[in-house]
């Protein structure tokens, strides 16, 4: 049986665990509907959680990802 690699030895999370959590957060982000302040607060918390998970998985590409998200959606070339 292959040994699972820990992303941060001080945490109990493996890379696979963090990727699963990130998937769940992104799914939830895709379904959030904003009706009031509490919903907006939940959206911000989910976005922060997503950013933290991405940063834990790979700190350098996380900065690039955060810059892309901050710049807004991009048009696809057709």
Image: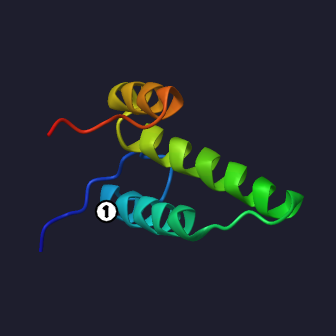
**Could you say where residue 71 lies in the image, as x and y percent from the top left?**
48, 26
Q: Which image quarter is the C terminus in?
A: top left
> How many numbered tags mark residues here?
1
Judging depth in this view, the residue of 41 and 53 nearest the camera is: 41
**Could you say where residue 72 lies in the image, as x and y percent from the top left?**
48, 33
Tell me if 9 is positioned left or right of 40 in this view. left
Q: Mark 1 Cα within 10 Å, few/some/many (few <14, many 20+)?
A: some
Tell me if 22 is positioned left or right of 37 in this view. left
* Residue at the front extreme of this rendering: 78
Tell me if 30 is positioned left or right of 8 in this view. right
- In the image, residue 61 sits, relative to residue 34, either above or below, namely above
Residue 28 sits in which quadrant?
Answer: bottom right
Colour mapping: rainbow
Pointer 1 residue: 16
Tell me if 36 is positioned left or right of 78 in this view. right
What residue lies at 68% left-to-right and 56% top-to-bottom? Answer: 43
* Residue at the right extreme of this rendering: 37
What residue lies at 42% left-to-right and 46% top-to-bottom? Answer: 9
What residue lies at 12% left-to-right and 74% top-to-bottom? Answer: 1
Q: Secondary structure at mark 1?
A: helix
**Could you say where residue 42 lies in the image, as x and y percent from the top left?**
74, 60
- In the image, residue 58 sits, relative to residue 36, either above or below, namely above
Judging depth in this view, the residue of 47 and 15 nearest the camera is: 47
* Residue at the bottom extreme of this rendering: 1
What residue lies at 80% left-to-right and 66% top-to-bottom? Answer: 35
């Amino acid at each position: 049986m292959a040994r699972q690699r820990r992303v941060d030895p001080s945490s109990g999370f493996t890379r696979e665990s963090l990727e699963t959590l990130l998937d769940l957060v992104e799914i939830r982000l895709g379904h959030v509907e904003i009706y009031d302040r509490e919903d907006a607060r939940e959206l911000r918390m989910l976005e922060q959680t997503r950013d933290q998970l991405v940063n834990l998985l790979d700190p350098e590409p996380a900065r690039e990802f955060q810059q892309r998200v901050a710049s807004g959606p991009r048009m696809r070339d057709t």
